[in-house]
Image (tube, rainbow, N blue to C red):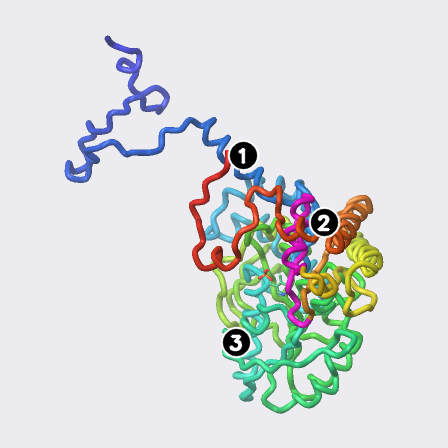
Amino acid sequence: MKTIFEKNNNVDGINFDDNYSNVDFIDEKFLRKDKIGLPQTSELEVLRHYKELSDRNFCIEKGFYPLGSCTMKYNPKVNEYLANLEGFLNIHPKLKDEDVQGSLELMYKLQESLKIITGMDAISLQPAAGAHGEFTGMMIIKKYYEVKGEKRKKVIIPDSAHGTNPASANMAGFEIVQVKSNEKGQVDIEALKELLTDDIAAIMMTNPNTLGIFEENVLEISELMHNNGSLLYYDGANFNAIMGHTNPKLMGFDIVHINLHKTFATPHGGGGPGAGPVAVVEALKDFLPTPVINYDGEMYHRNYNLENSIGAVKSYFGNFGVLIRAYAYILMQGKCLTNVSEDAVLNANYMKERLKNHYKLPYDEPCMHEFVLSGDFQKEKGVSTLNIAKRLMDSGVHPPTIYFPLIVHEAMMIEPTETESKKVLDEFIEIMVKIAKEVEENPEIILSAPNNAPIKKVDETLAARKPDLKFEMEN
Ligand SMILES: *Cc1c(COP(=O)(O)O)cnc(C)c1O
């Protein structure tokens, strides 16, 4: 029986002929003999499968996500819309400058905005994440001393630092020297002074530090370092605490990275994508990775000619989609960026003050955008911070960061962010108080948690040594 398709085999470019064995331009030996063997599932079945998986996942749209250090704020959907505009989405990085003026203008204006926010004199948008920015910064410092003809091989890092700091400095070829924290959770100035020899290249710090505490002596530290001929690197992951109120330049730093995906609202669960622009003072301008975007008053250009550039650290411009979201977020907030930080700090202090009656607060100081509790009291009763974290999952909240920073036993690092209401903060506080009570009255319920998550309590050691990646879902 003839079908309409045989008559109109090629209608408007649509080929109805699915018998590709007829093609005569491919050598016989390359043609498939058997069926391809793809899974036989309908589009609806595939959609249901992925919807089911996504329902089992946790995200900020589902519940409170106080993962300290990660700034899991709500990311306005308008940023997604803008990043998906045709003109941004369908361009190629190899197009000529004159054909992509809009995108270059966006990057240039983002550069200018971030220069104002950080106080710095020049910037590269290229690095793909915070840790990548750190590595870039360390390479800049290394090259700076090479050009200067100085042999400086060591980088000082506080004992409260994020693990990526020593890792990045080490990857760039530096030796790490640790400086300890004092009883206020800040860099111990006397200990720092003893470390200052003429082979110290730099100190890497974040301010507020990973305890959420502002380093009061930062200006003195900057003076000490500069008098020693050393540079100061600012890990900008905690920028959400200070935006518009102060900046790394005012604090005496020379290089800074900013985690656009944390502070400037790009969704970043599950490892990416991110962007970690690196900004520097005038003296380090020529060492930045290229291209940087310039404006000559008429046209925007990619500039590949920086005299001492460390070279490219990523292809093309870095993660352009993240740059669009960040710029949209900055325009949307305008001067209200200062309110973002104020609310983030207020929320953290509110929770800290209410929770310190129920959990140990090792550094009882005013905090910035996050604070660190210790589960020591609960641990004495046989319930660890890990158990508490799993129990939180039963109440539909994401656990805080745990066992970091390393200088706090049984650490719980809580960062509410500015995007949560008082109602949500109160609910979380009540859950934490309830768990503290359970530790006294009914610890078994905590020890068996999570009791109603998709995956129940696992054997930690077995899960690490022999991960069962083919987990079959129940029901
Ligand atoms: C997140 C974070 C980093 C690393 O940033 P990534 O973007 O995850 O690479 C570094 N330092 C601190 C303090 C952080 O919170």
Q: Which circle marks residue 410 in the picture?
A: none
In front here: 46 or 78? 46
- Say if disc 2 is inside 8 Å of ligand 1: no
Task: Name the image quarter holding the N terminus.
Answer: top left
Magenta segment includes 227: no
Where does the magenta region start and end?
Answer: 383-407
How many residues crowd around disc 1 within 10 Å: few (fewer than 14), some, or many (20 or more)? few
Quote the CA–CA distance across marks 2 and 1.
34 Å
Q: Amino acid at mark 3?
A: Asn
Q: Secondary structure at mark 1?
A: helix
- The residue pinned by badge 2 equals 331
Whole-percent x, y for residue 159 in the image: 65, 76
Q: Residue 402 vs residue 54: left or right?
A: right
Are dots 1 and 3 in contact, CB under 8 Å? no
Q: Quadrant of residue 241?
A: bottom right
How many residues crowd around disc 2 within 10 Å: few (fewer than 14), some, or many (20 or more)? some
Going from the N terminus, do you reach mark 1 or mark 3 first? 1
Q: Which circle marks residue 51 in the picture?
A: 1
